[in-house]
Image (spheres, rainbow, N blue to C red):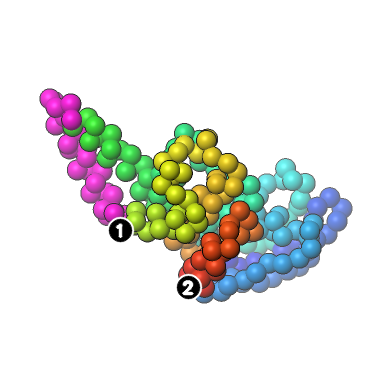
Amino acid sequence: MIEVQGFDLSVGARTLMSDVSFRIAKGDKIGLVGRNGAGKTTMTKVLAGVSDDRDGHTAHGEITRKGEVGYLPQDPRSGDPEQTARARILDARGLGTLRARMRDATDRMALGGADGEAAMRDYTRHEDRFLALGGYAAEAEGESIASNLKLPERILEQPLSTLSGGQRRRIELARILFSGAETMLLDEPTNHLDADSVVWLREFLQGY
């Protein structure tokens, strides 16, 4: 839920919005439309709580956010560039890093000896946490979302640094859809999607 009271937004000397108040409640589906330069992206950043003054805007007003907010910017550059696309998506629920730690423990177990025994304990600890967060069913859910956004297995196994801007954007969209955030703010989410993915996304959001 997001509630806004007395919101003003300006860029330089130009006022884009003045004394705006509204509430985004559970179940609401809202489309923000307007001409280029009207302030849609800037307002979305402010609502998401990720905006700063470097783009030359000034915002005033009271904004109350309840619950997690998932934000998809137009040009996403988030995440460790060496992390795989799969881990980036799954880490929206804390699963990606745990999966990597489980694989590392598995490799160490194969070496045997004292370190192998320690690795077995590490694996058990990481797997317990992994299962508590949804485990393999949640992992399959994340991979299904990625597949519907045309992110095949070979892409999911690649580091983020090797991917194109369009692929990175679809990965961030998949991450946010998988996160289960109470409120999602998506800036032009259909960019870089083909017709089938757009249809799937519409159906996903209708049922969210």
Residue that appears at 62% across and 71% down: 30
Which quarter shows the N terminus? Answer: bottom right
Q: Is residue 101 left or right of residue 8?
A: left
Residue that appears at 52% across and 35% down: 162
Of residue 90 and residue 128, the one placed in the foreground of this image is 90
Question: Element type at marker 2?
Answer: loop
Spot occupied by residue 66 in the image (x, y as percentages of width and height): 51, 63
Kindly tell me whether residue 164 is visible in this rendering.
yes
Q: Is residue 132 left or right of residue 173?
A: left
Residue matched to label 1: 137
Mark 2 surroundings within 10 Å by alpha-carbon count, few (fewer than 14), some (14 through 19), many (20 or more) = few
Q: Is residue 96 left or right of residue 7?
A: left
Question: Element type at marker 1?
Answer: helix
The dominant secondary structure in magenta is helix
Residue matched to label 2: 207
Say if the magenta span includes residue 130.
yes
Spot occupied by residue 129 in the image (x, y as percentages of width and height): 27, 49
Residue type indicated by callout 2: Gly
Say if the magenta span includes residue 179.
no
**Which is more N-terminal, label 2 or label 1?**
1
Provide the residue span drawn in magenta. 110-137
Residue 96 location, quadrant = top left
